[in-house]
Image (tube, coloured by chain):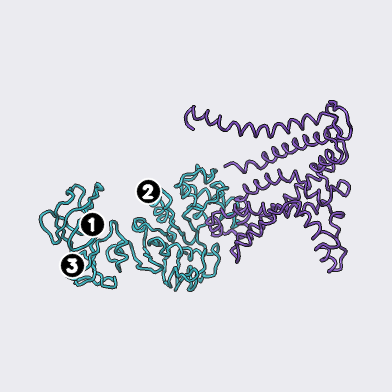
Chain colours: A purple, B cyan
């Protein structure tokens, strides 16, 4: 694309795609913004008057909003913690030479291919059910009272399910990063007298910093919008114990038929996601340069 | 400190024997070069000494003590890798200080030694840069600096100059030799470049297919190669090797004569031939002369001002006192008396 003519031709050629993408993004965004300022409830017929910030006011002062914010943070933070630490551990293990390497690597990736609804249901009915579940059986075998996961530790249970789904992703990214580490660096460190712990802390971990950043950024974006796992297991309960922001928006707009309120929640979620993104980019984005 | 001995050391990867059992002793303060073609096992041998690979059989003795099972860090050796293996996320200062930090040395002592190494290697201005911001030669120096600060019993160099361009290589070659003269520490240096071997070594170890072909000083190897392989490997351009009836005249299976030991004349001589390609290097000119005595052209070194046309008829006369004779096994035969 060297000449002026070819450059403008190129712009012309890609414009349909760009316009389509822009429209795809801007129209729903614009409609959400518009609805968020209307009193618009599907079970109240009549016209939809403009009410200014009223929807936002009610959404934010709703007691479940605070719970939802805290739950969202705990959910994202907990899953990140488990997947990053577990991912580093798995990556280190997979990096060791062993028999059946290829098959094991594929098996480790497998949970990522299971649909969220399916995996949450499997966990709910086959593992965490206090009567029929696997963990219940173990507890029974040990003579302990079985844990009723979704009523006793509902949020932690969801964190565990989501971590199980995202651990392969973190493992995959960190494992590929680990494989790109120059072996001579490790040997040099070994000659320099670094033991395994020091080699990990001074050579491997800095090498992985970039990959860890990528894992945290990508996962945060997806984890902020966790929904299916909550819907099929706890329905946000007990009470609001597992309601996150996404689920709260779902409750407002589809269970209470309050389109205006749901839209206001959506706009708040967009703003929050962007704040988190900027914050993350500032904090750890510098690892991505160089 | 710095005396290394290998006793019947061998190394196999699976069923492939990379190093066949060999003995070698390296004296204190020597500059020893392992040289050989690619895949001859020279790097493996170095890694066996370093402890980065376990020997399959035999023993490695450092300063008379058995170090066969000793961890690399405890052997008191420092290694400079082909890729330099600098730690990319650390500054030059931290790279050089890393072994000291691992040894939990006093911070002031660390600084003192790093400054000292930087002074020796002219790295003073670069201490706060990252390896990525340095040129190849500077990275090389940082890698050497990281080795120096440990004050090791011996330095191990694994083809350290192969990533540098030709001009820089000559410079670094001199710097490493200079460093050796100053530190008087044992150095083991692996290369496939026989020029590096000839110019730097006190002692050259020629390896081929996991076997030591010859050990000796550069001139020893040059003047009295023990077999055909060494004769062909050491010296540039290669020694001319002639088989057949001409060799039989000297009671040998193969005779070898170096390009500088052949007289070239347009009028008279023992071997008649025609000039093929000529390479003018300025000081010298190498003529490739096609002769009846040898199927391959014979290389002759002549003074730089000599000019012969392609296809010109010339006569070659080997100086018989420099003739090397080899038997049918390829081993050197004693000088004709």
Q: Badges 3 and 2: C-beta atoms under 8 Å apart?
A: no
Q: Badges 2 and 1: C-beta atoms under 8 Å apart?
A: no
Label 1 CA crowd tier, 10 Å (few <14, some 14–19, many 20+): many
The subunit carrying tag 2 is B
Which residue, given by chain and number where applicable, does mark 3 sit on?
Answer: B246
Q: Are marks 3 and 2 on the same chain?
A: yes
Residue A224 image point, x, y percent: 75, 43
Q: Are marks 2 and 1 on the same chain?
A: yes
Determine whether, in the image, residue B328 is placed left or right of residue A188: left
Query: Residue drawn 81% across and 56% down?
Result: A124
Please report whichever mark, 3 or 1, sits nearer to the chain's N-terminal start: 3
Name the mark nearer the viewer: 2 or 1.
1
Q: CA distance from mark 2 to mark 1?
A: 24 Å
Query: Residue drawn 10% across and 55% down?
Result: B267
**Depth check: B302 or A9 in front?**
A9
Q: Badges 3 and 1: C-beta atoms under 8 Å apart?
A: no
Residue A3 image point, x, y percent: 47, 29
The subunit carrying tag 1 is B
Please report whichever mark, 3 or 2, sits nearer to the chain's N-terminal start: 2
Instruction: Say what secondary structure mark 2 lies in.
Output: helix
Instruction: Say what secondary structure mark 1 lies in.
Output: strand
Residue B34 image point, x, y percent: 40, 62
Determine whether, in the image, residue A197 is placed left or right of residue B305: right
Residue A210 image point, x, y percent: 62, 47
- Residue A5, relative to residue B235: is it above or below? above
Which residue, given by chain and number where applicable, does mark 1 sit on?
Answer: B299
Label 3 CA crowd tier, 10 Å (few <14, some 14–19, many 20+): some
The subunit carrying tag 3 is B
Which residue, given by chain and number where applicable, does mark 2 sit on?
Answer: B166
């Amino acid at each position: 694309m060297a000449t002026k003519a070819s450059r403008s031709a190129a712009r012309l050629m890609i414009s349909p795609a760009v316009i389509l993408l822009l429209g795809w993004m801007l129209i729903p965004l614009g409609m959400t913004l518009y609805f968020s300022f209307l009193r618009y409830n599907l079970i109240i017929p009549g016209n939809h008057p403009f009410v200014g910030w009223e929807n936002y006011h009610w959404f934010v002062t709703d007691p479940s909003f605070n719970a939802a914010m805290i739950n969202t943070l705990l959910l994202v933070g907990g899953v990140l913690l488990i997947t990053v630490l577990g991912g580093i551990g798995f990556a280190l293990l997979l990096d060791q030479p062993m028999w059946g390497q290829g098959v094991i690597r594929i098996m480790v990736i497998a949970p990522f291919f299971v649909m969220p609804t399916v995996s949450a249901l499997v966990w709910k009915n086959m593992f965490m059910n206090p009567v029929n579940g696997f963990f219940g059986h173990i507890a029974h075998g040990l003579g302990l009272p079985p844990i009723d996961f979704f009523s006793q530790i509902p949020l932690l249970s969801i964190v565990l399910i989501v971590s199980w789904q995202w651990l392969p992703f973190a493992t995959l990214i960190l494992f590929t990063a680990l494989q790109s580490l120059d072996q001579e660096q490790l040997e040099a460190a070994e000659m320099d007298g670094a033991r395994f712990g020091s080699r990990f802390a001074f050579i491997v971990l800095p090498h992985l910093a970039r990959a860890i950043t990528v894992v945290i950024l990508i996962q945060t974006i997806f984890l902020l919008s966790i929904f299916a796992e909550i819907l099929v297991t706890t329905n946000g309960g007990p009470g609001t114990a597992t309601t996150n922001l996404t689920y709260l928006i779902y409750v407002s707009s589809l269970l209470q038929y309050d389109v205006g309120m749901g839209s206001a929640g959506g706009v708040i979620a967009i703003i929050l996601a962007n704040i988190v993104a900027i914050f993350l980019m500032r904090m750890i984005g510098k690892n991505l340069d160089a | 400190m710095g005396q290394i001995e290998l006793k019947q050391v061998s190394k196999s990867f699976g069923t492939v024997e990379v190093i066949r059992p060999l003995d070698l002793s390296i004296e204190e303060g020597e500059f020893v070069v392992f040289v050989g073609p690619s895949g001859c096992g020279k790097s493996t041998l170095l890694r066996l000494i370093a402890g980065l690979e376990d020997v399959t059989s035999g023993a490695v003795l450092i300063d008379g003590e058995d170090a066969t099972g000793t961890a690399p860090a405890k052997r008191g050796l420092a290694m400079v890798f082909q890729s330099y293996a600098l730690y990319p996320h650390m500054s030059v200062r931290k790279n050089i200080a890393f072994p000291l930090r691992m040894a939990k040395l006093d911070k002031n002592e660390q600084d003192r030694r790093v400054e000292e190494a930087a002074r020796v290697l002219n790295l003073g201005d670069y201490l706060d840069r990252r390896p990525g911001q340095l040129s190849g030669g500077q990275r090389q120096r940082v890698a050497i600096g990281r080795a120096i600060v440990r004050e090791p019993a011996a330095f191990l160099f694994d083809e350290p100059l192969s990533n540098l361009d030709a001009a820089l290589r000559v410079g670094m070659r001199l710097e490493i030799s200079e460093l050796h003269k100053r530190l008087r520490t044992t150095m083991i240096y692996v290369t496939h470049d026989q020029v590096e071997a000839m110019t730097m070594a006190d002692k050259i170890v020629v390896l081929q297919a996991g076997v030591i072909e010859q050990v000796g000083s550069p001139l020893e190897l040059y003047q009295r190669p023990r077999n055909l392989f060494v004769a062909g490997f050491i010296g540039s351009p290669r020694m001319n090797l002639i088989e057949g009836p001409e060799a039989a005249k000297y009671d040998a299976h193969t005779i070898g004569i170096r390009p500088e030991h052949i007289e070239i004349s347009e009028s008279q001589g023992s071997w008649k031939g025609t000039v093929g390609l000529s390479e003018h290097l300025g000081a010298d000119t190498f003529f490739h002369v096609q002769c009846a005595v040898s199927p391959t052209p014979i290389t002759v070194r002549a003074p730089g001002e000599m000019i012969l046309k392609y296809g010109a008829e010339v006569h070659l006369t080997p100086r018989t006192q420099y003739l090397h004779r080899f038997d049918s096994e390829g081993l050197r035969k004693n000088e004709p008396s």
